[in-house]
Image (spheres, rainbow, N blue to C red):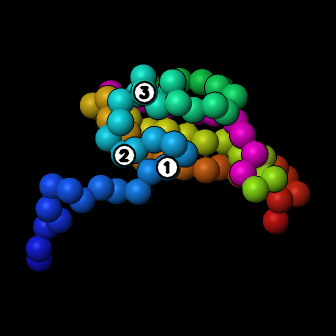
Amino acid sequence: MRLPDSSFRLPQFRNTSWNTSLEIVRGKESAYYLQKFIEFRIVTLSYKDRIDGIEARIDYTFKNDKLTKVSYIITQIDSY
């Protein structure tokens, strides 16, 4: 298997990049801030926003102060 060269970049997500620090993500995210959760040295920042008109929670997960995961959780009851 061939590994990507050093110019390889993962696509951006919500105006930020993977492996970005918590402080940079916090500064760039414009959605309504909900909470910060820390468990086993993994930090999650939660925000509330509308995605294509559907109410959702956005969770950014950081390990060693680097963005490793982002999830959308649909919170609008009548969204399906």
Residue 74 is situated, as x and y percent measured from the top left of the image, at 71, 52
Mark 2 lies on a secondary structure that is: loop
> Spatial distance from mark 1 to mark 2, Cα to Cα?
8 Å
Q: Which mark is residue 13?
A: 1
Tell me the quarter of the picture where residue 40 sits. Answer: top left
Identify the residue under disc 3. Answer: 24
Amino acid type at circle 1 is Phe
Whether pointer 1 and pointer 2 mark residues with C-beta atoms closer than 8 Å, the reply is yes
Q: Please give the range of residues in magenta.
A: 39-51
Q: Secondary structure at mark 1?
A: loop
Q: Can you give x and y, in whole percent of width and height, for residue 12 in the image?
A: 44, 51
Q: Which mark is residue 18?
A: 2
Question: Can residue 65 be seen at all in this image of the molecule?
Answer: yes
Sequence order check, earlier mark of 1 and 2: 1
Query: Position of 41 compared to 74: left or right?
Result: left
Is the magenta region chiefly helix, strand or loop? strand
Q: Is residue 5 above or below residue 41?
A: below
Amino acid type, mark 3: Ile
